[in-house]
Image (cartoon, helix red, strand yellow):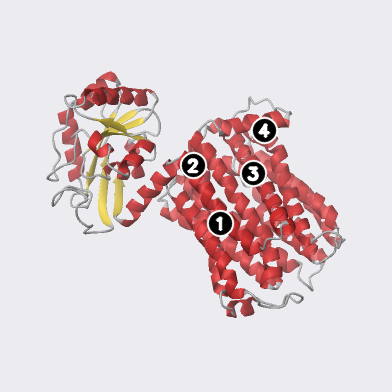
Amino acid sequence: MGAFNDNVFRQALILLIASGVVSTVSVNTLNNVALALFIVPFFLFSALAGQVADKYDKATLVRKIKMVEVFIMCAAAVGFFFDGVYFLLAVLFCMGLQSTFFGPIKYSIIPQHLTDKELVSGNALVEMGTFLAILLGSISGVFLKMDGVGDGVVAMTVVGLALLGYLAARGIPAAPAADSSIKINWNLWKETWHIVGYAREVKSVWMCVLAISWFWFMGAAYTTQLKVYVDDYLFGTDGLYALLLGTFSVGIGLGSFLCEKLSGKRVELGLVPLGSIGLSVFGIDLFFSYAGLAGVGSVTNNNIGVASFLQQPGGYRVLLDLLGIGVFGGFYIVPLFAFIQHRANPKHLSRIIAANNILNALLMVLSAVAGIVLVGLLEITVPQFFLALALSNILVAAYIYTVVPEFLIRLLVWMLTHTMYRVKHTGMDNIPDEGPCMLVCNHVSYVDALLLAGAIRRPVRFVMFKPIYDMPVLNYIFRTGKTIPIDSKSRNPKIYEQAFVRIREELAAGEVVCIFPEGRLTEDGEIDEFRAGIEKIVSDSPVPVIPMALSGLWGSVFSHKGGKALTHLPRRFWSRIKLAVGTGVSPQEVQASDLRKRVLALRECP
């Protein structure tokens, strides 16, 4: 209801500005000023909002915040009734302030009521619901301000939606404070840097915050310039504007829904690079698709409706590009939020979300500045501005994925498990959600580690035979995944000892370590004898050992069946692979031969 109301108000205000009520300032400048006024409160007051969200019950806070929205919308009703653009801009600032306090609660309340397995589904529903509300709100705002509809209808609508939002808030279950001992710091500038520090504690979380902020830079740029694009380049009606805006919003909702399906109810970072690729591809094509529409309509008479637009060469292509940008935007944004909720400290989560909102606001302000400077002052065309966004996205993505290669590794794993293989998991709950443990598994192919990494929810440190670790291409993946190379004590004693030192360090740090006790890939598809190294590891670091078994990989291009691996073309795709996880073995009971028997039994289980 909040997103719906925000967009009814903002679109009605955009169209009121476009009607020429204010003649002394350009429409483009006023639109960008409106965007800046809405998001500046996020930058100024998110530090306070994050503290409040962590200190008090979130359900109670939501009800109070939604009641404030009712009063703000009453003021908006007066502004619409009298066509008071500058007064409505002040109301827009108040709406931004109200949203500032709602934002940290919106995402930090999710992990309080959902399990880790439900995080992706929960975030997908929130994002899909939000953007469908944006769609319906934007379209409603457009049609409520079209000719023949009085300002009184807009006024009653925004007040009514605020009341419905308050009633919905009353149904939210209790969400106790994350840290009621917090002492509110009223020095907002100091606290802003403080909560940004919380977001930077974990590098991968910080990169997710930066990636989300960049997404909102792009989203704000597209939606803010879309009205100018329709009016000055497509020469379209308000109905066409509603169609294009709706297509973009439906795309994000659809992408969020598909993301939940494709992730397999896991926090799947592999979809993020896929999303960024799609954002750039469709963004670049949006620039070229305009060529098929050049010269359409009249500059002085915006008379191109939906039917006329779709009859023009390139009309459907523009729609497809906006839909594609939205869909891949959904792939991009949902896993990032879920990852932050999963990986961040729960006591600091609201403040980390607040830090995210600060960065979002900063990037959206910069988006407004970029629109004013590039389109308003330097007079580049809006299609050229869209092209610049798509090309800039490539540079930003390259930076983020270089700093945190986990994104690209997860993409590779996701592609492997959604093209060549179908992986069925059993017993995954036997792997603890926290604390150190050892995993032991049979070794069938060169992609065993990738498949295991894709199946296990926690980061895994693999102990890998050094000749496999040193293989081209795979070496980059193994290094960035903090794989531990090992070799025989007789052939390379230095590497052998270093491996055991690394294993002890990782287990002491509470990490999951996986070893293939056979020491090499199977030559005949059978499980070789397990070496005694696992016993040495557990004697030095007494942690639970969890047996696992892979089946269905023998015969793949990455196995040794029919000769050396990778020497022949793949014979099959979408093969069914099974990963079975057994119950843990206490460190006092660990024996290499017993573990081999357990892995054999797991492999033979139907």
Amino acid of disc 3: Gly
Residue that carries the numbered disc 4 in the rendered image: 192
Q: Residue furthest top?
A: 540
* SS for dot 2: helix
Residue that carries the numbered disc 3 in the rendered image: 103
Mark 1 touching mark 2, by CB under 8 A? no
Give the CA separation, mark 4 to mark 2: 22 Å
| Residue neighbourhood size for the residue with mark 1, other residues' Cα within 10 Å, grouped as few (<14), some (14–19), many (≥20) | many
Give the CA separation, mark 1 to mark 2: 25 Å
Instruction: Please give left or right for residue 488 compared with residue 384 in the image.
Output: left
Mark 4 touching mark 2, by CB under 8 A? no
* SS for dot 1: helix
Instruction: Please give left or right for residue 424 compared with residue 299 in the image.
Output: left
Task: Measuring from the top left, give residue 123's x and y in whole percent.
Answer: 52, 48
Mark 3 touching mark 2, by CB under 8 A? no
Residue that carries the numbered disc 2 in the rendered image: 339
Examine the rendering and report whether any part of residue 164 can be seen: no
Q: Earlier in the sequence, mark 1 or mark 3?
A: 3
The image quadrant that residue 228 belongs to is bottom right
Mark 1 touching mark 4, by CB under 8 A? no
State which quarter of the image contains the N terminus: bottom right
Give the CA separation, mark 1 to mark 4: 30 Å
Of the numbered discs in the image, which one, if any, rests on residue 18?
none
Nearer the observer, 471 or 186 = 471
Mark 1 or 3: the one toward you? 1
Mark 1 or 4: the one toward you? 1
Mark 4 or 2: the one toward you? 4
Amino acid of disc 4: Thr
The image quadrant that residue 539 belongs to is top left
Residue that carries the numbered disc 1 in the rendered image: 390
Mark 1 touching mark 3, by CB under 8 A? no
The residue depicted at 76 percent of the width and 70 percent of the height is: 146
